[in-house]
Amino acid sequence: MKERARFAPSPTGPLHIGGVRTALFNWLFSKNQKGTFHLRIEDTDKERSKDEHRIQIIKSLKWTGIEHDGEEYIQSTKIDDHIKIANNLLKNGNAYKCYCSGEEIEEQKKRARQKKLPYIYNRKWRDIPESEAPKDIKPVIRFKSKIEGSTILKDLVQG
């Protein structure tokens, strides 16, 4: 399988040194693995995203010698694909709709900090039937991961 790496800046301002660093690491990894390097523009913040910033980011990357393979991906143009995938995850029982407000989540995080514990989402809506869902709140979709056991990820950098 051919390795694919990507850099996904938000076009909300000029490219900064931290972004260049991330792009460079990912570009070097893709080249070392004889793979491809892609640019995905994260234009999901519609209020602050500007085409002039997107153009500046691409020019800045080229100036540093970092060029992506193929055309850049524009995140907002993929929304139909994302909806289809999310609906499949819901249909197959691998995701669920969460109706917690941002304030609720922040309160949970605050309580965890006060107890000096890491924040772990409480899965409040994980097993509640759709019929009991509020009609006036737009949900987010969360992965329905296993509650028992552990999930192991092999990080190529950290091990």
Image: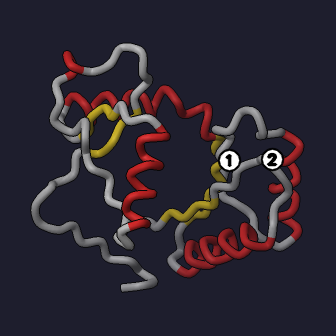
Residue 158 in which image quadrant: bottom left
Q: Position of residue 40 (x, y in %)?
A: 63, 50
Relative to 39, residue 142 above or below: above
Q: Are marks 2 and 1 in contact (CB under 8 Å)?
A: yes
Say left or right for 94 vs 7.
left
Q: Which mark is residue 54?
A: 2
Q: Residues within 10 Å of mark 2 (few under 14, many from 20)?
A: many
Observer able to see residue 1: no
Q: Amino acid at mark 2?
A: Arg
Q: Residue at x 28, y 31 (%)?
A: 88
Q: Residue at x 56, y 81 (%)?
A: 32
Quadrant of image for the C terminus: bottom left
Q: Residue at x 53, y 74 (%)?
A: 34
**Residue behind mark 1:** 41
Q: Position of residue 22 (x, y in %)?
A: 65, 71
Relative to 24, residue 126 above or below: above
Say left or right for 131 vs 73.
left
Q: Position of residue 130 (x, y in %)?
A: 22, 21
Q: How is the image coloured?
A: secondary structure
